[in-house]
Image: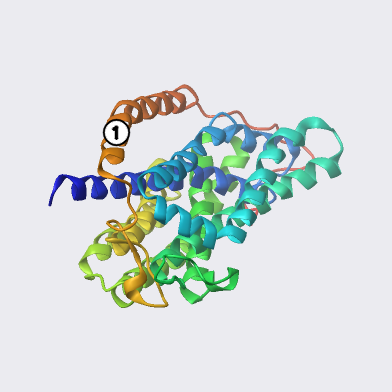
Amino acid sequence: MDAYTALQVVWFVLISILWLGYFVLEGFDFGVGMLLPFLPRDEHERQGMLASIGPVWDGNETWLVVAGGATFAAFPAWYATMFSGFYLAFLLLLVCLIVRVLSFEWRSKRDSPGWRTGWMWANTLGSVGASFVWGVGLSSLLYGLPIDSDHVYTGGLIDLFNWYTILGGIAVVLVFTCHGASFLTLKVGGHLRERTVYTAQRLSILAFVGGGLYLAATVAVAADRNDRPVIAPLLPALVGVAALLVAMILSRRRPGWSFAATGVAAISIVATLFAGLYPRVMVSSTDFSNSLTVGNASSAHYTLKVMTVVAAVFLPLVLVYQGWTYHVFRQRLGSAPVPATAPPTDEPAL
């Protein structure tokens, strides 16, 4: 392997790592957003859920921005084909993310219950919609898309949807929701935490079934649609299935370990996808030879060298800063007082 090829592989791996970080960090705050209408019993508890992700949710989105920028700089052909082909899907995603951001900022601007309820549902629908679109979009890279010999996307929005990509969207929603519930067990207290632990236990079963099916399907699709050896995507897939099983077993007794396990599961979804995708970055369903690869989609050697130096300097700084942020806001939040006329119940909110 020459130096140029090595740099291409390095940047494929780095972009994969950026997606890993995005799924782990943004995954739990998407999950919290999905649970907003169901877990809390009053406004105080709902504010506590929002406060649990308030200091970190916008920083988590930085991983998405950096992943997009790195793709543009390191693999411009991949970026061009993907963003032009996924134009409507990305527009829908952008709407979901914007609505979600507005819900954080505008929900507290008025005391009207209807106003707060409306923005609560906006956050939930934005979180569900964004998670589903990410699952569909990333899965379609592996399943195959209509790409011609000039690496131009020739399909439409409907070409993104098939049994595998829809399963991917559902699996990501389920894993993120479970990840968010596991996160809340570490951040909230009182009766809200009791309901959260109960809900996380139930969600872990759904995440195990949905995530396990998707990981198994990804291994099969990588071998069938991308001519990959089964062993490459199988290893991270097995780790993901094991992590989901651990989360299901420990969700009630060891919530910290359960949260770590759901994080590993989110990592495994991305790792299995990218392991099944390499050395291609977009598979062509029109003609397999039209697929974009790490070699034919990358920037020039000099560009990759400069980018590598910049990443080596600044990426550790970003990691240290974000790690420090989570350390500062690591404490558990307080819980709402429970009125005497409405005793708490051990039944789940879901």
Q: Is residue 158 left or right of residue 103?
A: left
The structure's colour scheme is rainbow
User: How many discs mark residues in the rendered view?
Assistant: 1
Residue 56 image position (x, y, % from top left): 53, 32
Image quadrant where one finds the C terminus: bottom right
Q: Quadrant of residue 150?
A: bottom left
Which residue: 33% across, 60% down?
Answer: 272
Position of 171 relative to 321 (above/below): below
The image shows residue 115, relative to residue 144, as above or below, that is: above
Residue at label 1?
306
- Residue 277 left/right relative to 124: left
40 or 127: which is nearer to us? 127
| Depth order, front residue of 87/151 | 151
Q: Is residue 220 left or right of residue 344?
A: left
Q: Residue at x 56, y 49 (%)?
A: 31
Residue lying at 34% horizontally and 75% vertically, measured from the top left? 288
Rendering coords of residue 223 (x, y %)? 28, 74
Can residue 234 be seen in the rendering of this structure? yes
Q: Establish if 285 lies above or below 254.
A: below
Please provide percent x and percent y for residue 53: 57, 35
Q: Residue furthest front?
A: 150
Of 265 and 301, which appears nearest the observer? Answer: 301
Residue 258: tell me if it is visible.
no
Residue kind at label 1, given as amino acid type: Val
Decide which of 122, 143 is in the foreground and name it.
143
Q: Residues within 10 Å of mark 1 (few under 14, many from 20)?
A: few
Q: Residue at x 23, y 63 (%)?
A: 232
**Regarding mark 1 in the picture, which secondary structure is present there?**
helix
Q: Residue furthest left?
A: 1
Q: Position of residue 175 (x, y in %)?
A: 48, 56
Residue 157 falls in which quadrant of the image?
A: bottom right
